[in-house]
């Protein structure tokens, strides 16, 4: 009996010791952090904004992921520009009733009008364009023997409209780039219409032959936004004008041969389809 009590007492003491050890461990784990220890909360990443979508469509004044950068094979553009036509009047010859008026020089006024251009890219580098516009000019004869006959330095001969369609082949240096300079060669045709004599010296009838000549040009396209482009262009045309003027009775006839050689400067906006 004494042995049983001694065994029971020993078991109770062992259990008490185990409980004390466990309590000490729990107390140590739950003890507050030492002074001076700071806790830093980890940053929480903000959710990423979903990519901008266009519902399968891109606005006409937007540059989207689907927008083609620059120009290349198969592109077709329509361009509206403001064009200035500046005749150079390099060389002229004037005659009255078959007699040449020595020293008389013909001058043609400058003109500015809208210009419409259609352009198609045959390859990445080569494009062909057709240009259409119509400008109004006044023609006068200055100085020389005609001034002695007319009694004044400048004699107005008349005015005329000209339709000068031009076909040009251009080489583009930087296909598929926003900035794309080019050079070109082509031909220009000139049809004069609605011609009227000024009435000076009795000249009431004015007519001109159909003419034309080669041209060279240089310019650039720059992609502004979406399929919209800015264009600047300079053309030098080499052409001569042959005109006739007479009075109502036909007793006075004048003839003019003039190297117009106009320089055409234009700038405008184009849209690619």
Image: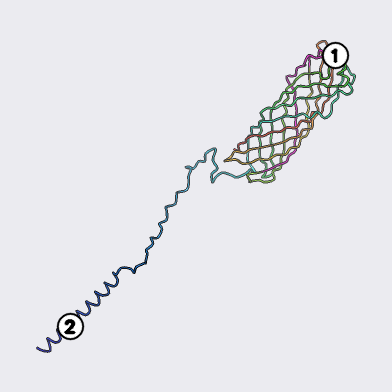
Seen from the viewer's position, the closer of residues 177 and 128 is 177
The mark lying in front, picked from 2 and 1, is: 2
Q: Is residue 85 magenta?
A: no
Residue 232: image x %, image y %?
A: 68, 37
Seen from the viewer's position, the closer of residues 128 and 261 is 261
Taking 273 as reference, is 265 left or right?
A: right
Q: Is residue 191 magenta?
A: yes
Residue 252 image label: 1
Of the image marks 2 and 1, the number of the one nearer the N terminus: 2
Residue 265 image label: none
Residue assigned mark 2:
11
Element class at badge 2: helix
Specify few, some or many for label 1: CA neighbours under 10 Å numbering under 14, 14-19, or 20 or more.
some
Q: CA distance from mark 2 to mark 1?
A: 150 Å
Residue 261: image x %, image y %?
A: 79, 31
Task: Write down the region rendered in magenta.
Answer: 180-205
Q: Main secondary structure of the magenta part?
A: strand
């Amino acid at each position: 009996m004494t042995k049983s009590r001694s065994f029971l007492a020993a078991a109770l003491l062992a259990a008490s010791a185990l409980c004390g050890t466990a309590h000490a461990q729990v107390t140590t784990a739950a003890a507050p952090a030492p002074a001076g220890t700071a806790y830093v909360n980890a940053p929480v990443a903000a959710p990423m904004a979903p990519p901008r979508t266009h519902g399968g469509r891109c606005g006409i004044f937007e540059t989207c992921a689907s927008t083609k950068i620059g120009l290349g094979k198969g592109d077709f553009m329509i361009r509206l520009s403001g064009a200035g036509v500046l005749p150079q009047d390099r060389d002229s010859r004037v005659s009255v009733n078959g007699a040449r008026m020595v020293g008389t020089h013909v001058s043609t006024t400058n003109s500015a009008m809208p210009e419409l251009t259609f352009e198609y890219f045959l390859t990445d580098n080569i494009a062909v364009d057709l240009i259409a516009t119509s400008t109004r000019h006044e023609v006068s004869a200055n100085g020389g023997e005609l001034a002695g006959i007319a009694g004044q330095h400048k004699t107005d001969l008349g005015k005329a409209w000209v339709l000068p369609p031009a076909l040009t082949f251009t080489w583009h240096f930087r296909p598929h780039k926003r900035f794309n300079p080019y050079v070109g060669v082509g031909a220009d045709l000139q049809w004069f219409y609605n011609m009227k004599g000024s009435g000076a010296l009795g000249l009431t009838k004015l007519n001109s032959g159909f003419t034309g000549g080669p041209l060279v040009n240089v310019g650039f396209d720059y992609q502004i936004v979406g399929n919209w482009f800015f264009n600047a262009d300079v053309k030098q045309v080499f052409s001569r004008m042959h005109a006739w003027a007479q009075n109502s009775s036909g007793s006075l006839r004048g003839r003019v041969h003039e190297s117009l050689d106009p320089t055409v400067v234009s700038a405008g906006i184009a849209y690619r389809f």
